[in-house]
């Protein structure tokens, strides 16, 4: 395969189908969940100097200063201080770049495990959906993957009323990636919704807004607006870059609309349900998706913070047998949604494979730790770095629209 992540998609899709086929055997699903989780985790951690971002991440890691020097430089570090401190710590311990990526991915999967273990059922399907949605986050975006992990830890701590530790995780989230301030800010706003009654109308409004954004061309946000925002210049530059791309028609819009409709329909049959932290995050996430829908390059960055909670809250709603019976054709809608999601991810997997074949540089072709049996670490590193450099020179942005 030209794209290693296609193999992850295939495995995740098969797991999703297996979850559907074992719906009547809850005990089997409980036994399969840890096994299948380990399979996906294994497929993610075995990659070795993989992806285009190694061109910047590897030199940064190999030349990182000591902990004291990184702390003294503060905001002058090449990357966020939290990420730089972690790299300095691991590099000082003599860990290789691969062990650093292993640490990042392991933290992410621990966060997912702690989150998903609370679900009454559909754990396998939920894990598959999250991994497929955020494959790029797991495989390529080390800094933000750390930020998302600690954000999930923060919400879990809030759910268990561990407020001091939640604040610590919030600080770490922002220090790991500058985008972390956005979900943290939304969480602070969401505190006013906690334990208040949920209204299905909000999802109806979001559905209408999304339809408008899909049907009507929306003017891109001017960079001049960015200049007046009270944010550091590095934030402004990053936002301007991400807002420089817009796309009106996206295949994923079908999934967004289906989720909004399901949330709206299911909540309309429960006038007593109140917001939990998971529900607050699901609402914030769907709001972010709708408002930033045309700006997919920015959206895929911010969406990752909320995807685990959107999926989990959806599973909670669909797993409520009494609610499903109350909703007309509830069982049919639930099954139709799950099949729609799997079909969409089959489309994404095919698109990714085709997109990778169009690239001049095989930057997404699999490279795993097992290649160490045939070549030295230095040889593999140099080869992959050359491929990454070629990608940024010849192929950058070609792939951006290939999976939408």
Image: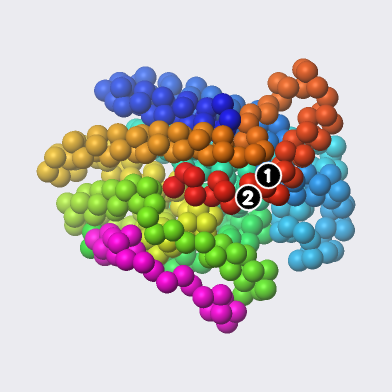
Q: Evaluate whether residue 210 shows in this view.
A: no
- Say which residue appears at 60% left-offset and 64% top-offset: 241
**Residue picked out by circle 2:** 396
Q: Evaluate whether residue 11 shows in this view.
A: yes
Q: Is residue 246 left or right of residue 197?
A: right
In the rendered image, which quarter is residue 27 located in?
top left
Q: Is residue 138 left or right of residue 281?
A: right
User: Would you say the residues marked 1 and 2 are in contact, meaning their CB atoms lie under 8 Å apart?
Assistant: yes
Tell me residue 348's x, y (percent).
44, 38
Q: Is residue 374 above or below residue 241?
A: above
Residue 265 among magenta residues: no
Q: Is residue 93 left or right of residue 347?
A: right
Which label sits on residue 391?
1
Part of the protein shown in magenta: 203-228
- Say which residue appears at 24% left-offset and 61% top-offset: 204
Q: Is residue 244 left or right of residue 322?
A: right
**Residue 259 versus residue 159: which sits nearer the camera?**
259
Tell me which secondary structure the magenta stretch mostly adopts: helix
**Residue 94 versus residue 44: which sits nearer the camera?**
44
- Say which residue appears at 73% left-offset and 22% top-offset: 371
């Amino acid at each position: 395969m030209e794209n290693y992540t296609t193999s992850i998609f295939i495995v995740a899709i098969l797991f999703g189908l297996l979850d559907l086929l074992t719906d009547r055997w809850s005990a089997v699903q409980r036994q399969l969940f840890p096994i299948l989780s380990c399979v996906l985790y294994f497929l993610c951690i075995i990659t070795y100097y993989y992806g285009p971002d190694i061109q910047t991440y590897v030199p940064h890691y190999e030349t990182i200063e000591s902990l004291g020097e990184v702390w003294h430089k503060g905001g002058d570090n090449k990357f966020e201080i939290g990420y730089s401190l972690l790299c300095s710590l691991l590099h000082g311990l003599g860990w290789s770049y691969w062990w650093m990526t292993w640490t990042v991915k392991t933290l992410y999967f621990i966060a997912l495990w702690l989150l998903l273990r609370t679900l009454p059922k559909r754990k396998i399907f939920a894990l598959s959906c999250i991994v497929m949605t955020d494959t790029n986050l797991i495989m390529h975006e080390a800094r933000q993957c750390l930020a998302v992990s600690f954000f999930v830890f923060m919400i879990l701590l809030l759910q268990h009323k561990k407020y001091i530790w939640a604040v610590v995780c919030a600080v770490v989230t922002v220090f790991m990636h500058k985008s972390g301030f956005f979900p943290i800010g939304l969480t602070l706003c969401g505190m006013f919704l906690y334990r208040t009654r949920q209204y299905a109308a909000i999802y109806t409004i979001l559905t209408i807004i999304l339809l408008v954004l899909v049907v009507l061309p929306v003017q891109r946000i001017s960079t001049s607006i960015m200049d007046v925002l009270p944010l550091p210049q590095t934030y402004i530059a990053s936002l301007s870059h991400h807002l420089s791309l817009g796309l009106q028609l996206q295949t994923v819009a079908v999934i967004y609309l289906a989720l909004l409709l399901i949330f709206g329909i299911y909540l309309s049959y429960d006038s007593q349900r109140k917001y939990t932290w998971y529900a607050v995050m699901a609402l914030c996430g769907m709001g972010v998706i709708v408002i930033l829908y045309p700006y997919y390059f920015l959206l895929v960055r911010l969406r990752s913070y909320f995807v685990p909670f959107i999926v989990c809250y959806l599973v909670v709603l669909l797993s409520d047998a009494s609610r499903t019976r109350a909703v007309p054709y509830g069982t049919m809608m639930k099954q139709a949604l799950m099949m729609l999601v799997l079909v969409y991810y089959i489309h994404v997997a095919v698109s990714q494979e085709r997109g990778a074949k169009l690239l001049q540089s095989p930057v997404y072709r699999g490279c795993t730790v097992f290649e160490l049996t045939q070549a030295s670490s230095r040889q593999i590193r140099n080869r992959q770095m050359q491929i990454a450099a070629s990608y940024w020179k010849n192929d950058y942005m070609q792939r951006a629209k290939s999976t939408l």
